[in-house]
Image: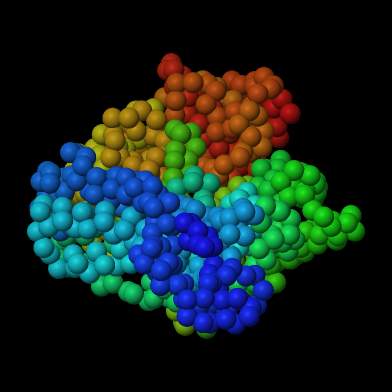
């Protein structure tokens, strides 16, 4: 008898003689075999069909992965739902009886998605790693089952392990939700949606790792190839996006403001996440993990099965691809690396390309030209290192030169395309007839901005990020002209223009977002602007949108035109409506807290609104005379009254002689005399304004619209120099000449001087600005240039 006890490693076939006589022995043969049923004696002996026997063997060899998966997913799903007392769905204090269901916390979704991918990928490697061992490959491919049966047996077991590992924890979470919160609309629909989505995510990872095993010769190669198949879309998008952010002028993809608090537009990884095998269910799982009833939404939103169905079809295609690759795989490939030079080269290219992108990101901070050289060096070094260590090749040196040249050529071509405008991306400006509305950064005074602002303030300088949306044709045309200016200027160097100060380029957040008539959006972001460009943007103050917004803000109305609860806490409108009022002369010698009845307050605000509406943008940013005094509306009056410096919770009104309505109100209410300066000036110290001078060289944005402030220090300049000795002017005649020239509010676009004015008899220094065009000749002589 030839029968063996290890039936799964033996193929029983008829002999070449074709002897089919009843009772004749079955002989094992490698030549022209014809599959037949094993003898009945054998079937009786093993009690199993060979396919079912193989199913049992595969399951018994890999059930440990199921146990590990269940432990991990039970922690991420049911335990996270009900196992932590502070956030448990059984805790009424947490749910407020408004939570209708929660299968897992939304912030657990990234970890859950990552675990699902790892679980599916691990199953793929574990169930098909037999192809990577020569002895096992020879034995398994010599079984009585065809390669197709062998493939689908393991695939079916993998699907079962995957389904059990994911669905059991989800069912437990479903039961916990029913026990804690009851059955509510959408509960079962969301359960099936999340379960199906997670299963598909794991199934795609499982299938891709099978393909990785089929393409590889060793376990190391299989692990690397599988990782590349899973991560290639994300790595490619991430790397290209880095090149775009560094080289493409106007790029908005993945652009983040200097503060790091606002993403201008999603990056390529996020945009293509629905087409990414490891990220396609990330956002849906976060969105649909729970439902919390709100005042505006009593029922959970409807589910779209479009994405899961598309990925179900993709999983089917990947399954066919994996089966096809397995059928074409040569058994002798096992235990030998480097037999798939095409995929190995693609793996090396992706690794080198990602490393070069990271190099560009970090080196470009110091020098863009240096970064180009560093990218080439890293590409070459990575290629050589990977070839010498992880991916040795049997190809000749000519092939290596060709591959390396191809990598350099592809990367160089990408750099050239991006630097020259990204095939028209940088120069794309829509026609005015295509635009429904446009949002554009506002570089003007934050004191009258209508809407919430974000930014920072230091007591000396400040920076706010704000956008106005324009929908009037003439306003849109004005924005288009400004945008065209940026497209033509290109990426200028951040430095002072020694020939013309207005040409100085500063770090700044410039955003432009068009809503087109066909529903599409066109977004651009610029991380720098010259003083010329910022000055041109000030002209938007004369547009209808900004004028109407300023009036609404002063009257304490939000973007929706309503006062009160609709206002953002951090906004000029909130300060006008709720802030404590302070009145001072322009030297802040004796600030006075003003208490007004609601009616009088509205009367004052109406007067200010009328005066501001009568200002041109030139009068606002380039006043010819110093203000008579300052009105401050502060939501933190105790601190703000000490410095009168602008911050996000206050707003300042510089009362000039042209503010006739405001002056009339102050006169009628006996407050006009508080604008008169009764003190004396002891000294005035000047420092030439240079944003790139001193220890605080400009690396982050700072508003160029100067607003005066006071401190107790003689060295609280907006820019702190680290050299030179400042000599104060103490001559009374010169001080008298300079006093009306010093500005409390001025846009510093053409050079000038920061000044520290010491009040006589007080330890108080008032910081103002002297434009260069107004400075007497002797002022420059006092500088240590």
**In the depicted structure, whether residue 508 falls above or below residue 253:** above
Colour pattern of the rendering:
rainbow
> Is residue 665 at all visible to an observer of this figure?
no
- Viewport quadrant of the C terminus: top right
Q: Position of residue 749 (x, y in %)?
A: 62, 48
Q: Residue 153: in sight, yes or no?
A: yes
| In-front residue for pair 89/394 | 394
The residue depicted at 44 percent of the width and 41 percent of the height is 456
> Which residue is drawn at the image coordinates 59% and 45% (left, top)?
748
Q: Report the residue at 44% width, 38% height from top.
A: 457
Q: Is residue 1 left or right of residue 492?
A: left
Residue at 70% from the left image edge and 43% from the top image edge: 363
Specify the farthest residue to the right: 398
Return the x and y of residue 613 as percentages of the image width and height. 39, 61
Image position of 516 with respect to 374: above or below: below
**Residue 531, how many percent across, how many down?**
63, 51
Which of 422 and 198 lies nearest the eye of the viewer?
Answer: 198
């Amino acid at each position: 008898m030839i029968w063996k006890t290890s039936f799964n490693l033996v193929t029983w076939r008829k002999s070449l003689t074709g002897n089919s006589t009843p009772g004749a022995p079955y002989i094992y043969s490698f030549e022209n075999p014809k599959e037949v049923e094993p003898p009945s004696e054998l079937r009786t002996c093993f009690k199993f069909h060979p396919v079912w026997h193989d199913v049992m063997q595969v399951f018994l060899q890999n059930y440990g992965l199921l146990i590990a998966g269940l432990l991990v997913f039970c922690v991420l799903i049911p335990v996270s739902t009900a196992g932590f007392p502070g956030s448990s769905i059984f805790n009424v204090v947490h749910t407020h009886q408004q939570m209708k269901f929660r299968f897992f916390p939304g912030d657990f979704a990234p970890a859950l998605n990552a675990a699902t991918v790892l679980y599916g990928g691990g199953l793929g490697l574990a169930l098909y790693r037999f192809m990577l061992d020569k002895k096992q490959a020879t034995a398994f491919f010599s079984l009585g089952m065809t390669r197709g049966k062998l493939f689908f047996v393991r695939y079916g077991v993998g699907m079962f392990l995957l389904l059990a590992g994911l669905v059991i924890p989800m069912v437990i979470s479903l039961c916990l939700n029913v026990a804690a919160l009851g059955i509510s609309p959408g509960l079962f629909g969301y359960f099936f949606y999340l379960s199906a989505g997670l299963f598909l995510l794991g199934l795609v990872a499982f299938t891709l790792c099978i393909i990785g095993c089929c393409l590889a010769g060793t376990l190391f190669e299989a692990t690397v190839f599988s990782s590349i198949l899973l991560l290639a879309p994300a790595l490619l998008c991430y790397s290209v996006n880095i090149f775009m952010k560094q080289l493409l002028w106007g790029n908005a993809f993945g652009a983040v403001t200097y503060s790091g608090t606002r993403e201008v537009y999603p990056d390529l990884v996020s945009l293509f996440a629905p087409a990414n095998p490891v990220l396609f269910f990330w956002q849906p799982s976060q969105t649909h993990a729970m439902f919390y009833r709100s005042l505006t939404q009593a029922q959970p939103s409807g589910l779209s099965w479009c994405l899961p169905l598309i990925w179900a079809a993709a999983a089917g295609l990947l399954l066919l691809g994996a089966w096809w690759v397995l059928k074409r795989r040569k058994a002798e490939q096992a235990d030998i690396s480097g037999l798939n030079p095409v995929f190995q080269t693609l793996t090396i290219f992706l690794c080198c390309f990602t490393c070069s992108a990271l190099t560009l990101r970090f080196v470009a901070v110091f020098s863009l030209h240096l970064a180009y050289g560093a990218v080439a060096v890293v590409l070459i070094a990575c290629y050589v290192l990977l070839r010498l260590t992880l991916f040795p090749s049997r190809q000749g040196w000519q092939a290596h030169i060709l591959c390396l040249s191809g990598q350099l050529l592809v990367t160089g071509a990408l750099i050239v395309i991006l630097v020259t405008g990204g095939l028209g991306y940088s120069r794309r400006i829509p026609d005015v007839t295509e635009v429904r509305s446009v949002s554009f950064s506002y570089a003007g005074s934050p004191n009258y901005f209508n809407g919430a602002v974000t930014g920072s303030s230091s007591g000396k300088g400040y920076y706010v990020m704000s956008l106005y949306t324009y929908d009037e044709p003439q306003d849109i045309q004005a924005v288009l002209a400004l945008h065209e200016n940026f497209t033509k200027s290109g990426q200028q160097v951040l430095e002072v223009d020694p020939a013309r100060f207005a040409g100085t380029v500063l770090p700044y957040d410039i955003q432009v977002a068009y809503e087109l008539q066909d529903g599409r959006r066109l977004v651009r972001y610029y991380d720098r602007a010259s003083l010329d460009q910022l000055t041109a943007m000030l002209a938007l103050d004369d547009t209808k949108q900004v004028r109407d917004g300023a009036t609404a803000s002063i009257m304490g109305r939000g973007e929706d035109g309503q006062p009160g609860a609709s206002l953002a806490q951090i906004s000029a409108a909130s300060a006008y409506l709720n802030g404590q009022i302070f009145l001072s002369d322009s030297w802040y010698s004796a600030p006075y807290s003003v208490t007004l009845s609601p009616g009088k307050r509205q009367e004052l605000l109406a007067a200010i609104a009328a005066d501001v509406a009568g200002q041109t943008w030139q009068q606002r940013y380039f006043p010819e005379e110093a203000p008579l005094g300052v009105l401050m509306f502060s939501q933190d009056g105790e601190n703000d009254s000490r410095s009168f410096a602008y911050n996000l919770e206050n707003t300042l009104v510089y009362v000039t002689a042209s503010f006739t309505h405001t002056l009339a109100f102050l006169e009628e209410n006996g407050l006009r005399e508080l604008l008169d300066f009764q003190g004396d000036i002891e000294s005035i110290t000047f420092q030439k304004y240079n944003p790139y001078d001193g220890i605080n060289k400009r690396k982050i944005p700072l508003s160029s619209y100067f607003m005066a402030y006071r401190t107790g220090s003689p060295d609280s300049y907006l820019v702190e120099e680290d050299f030179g000795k400042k000599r104060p002017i103490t001559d009374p005649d010169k001080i008298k000449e300079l006093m009306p020239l010093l500005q409390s509010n001025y846009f510093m676009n053409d050079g000038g001087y920061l000044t520290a004015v010491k009040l006589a008899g007080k330890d108080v220094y008032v910081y103002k600005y002297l434009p260069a065009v107004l400075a007497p000749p002797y002022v420059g002589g006092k500088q240590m240039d």
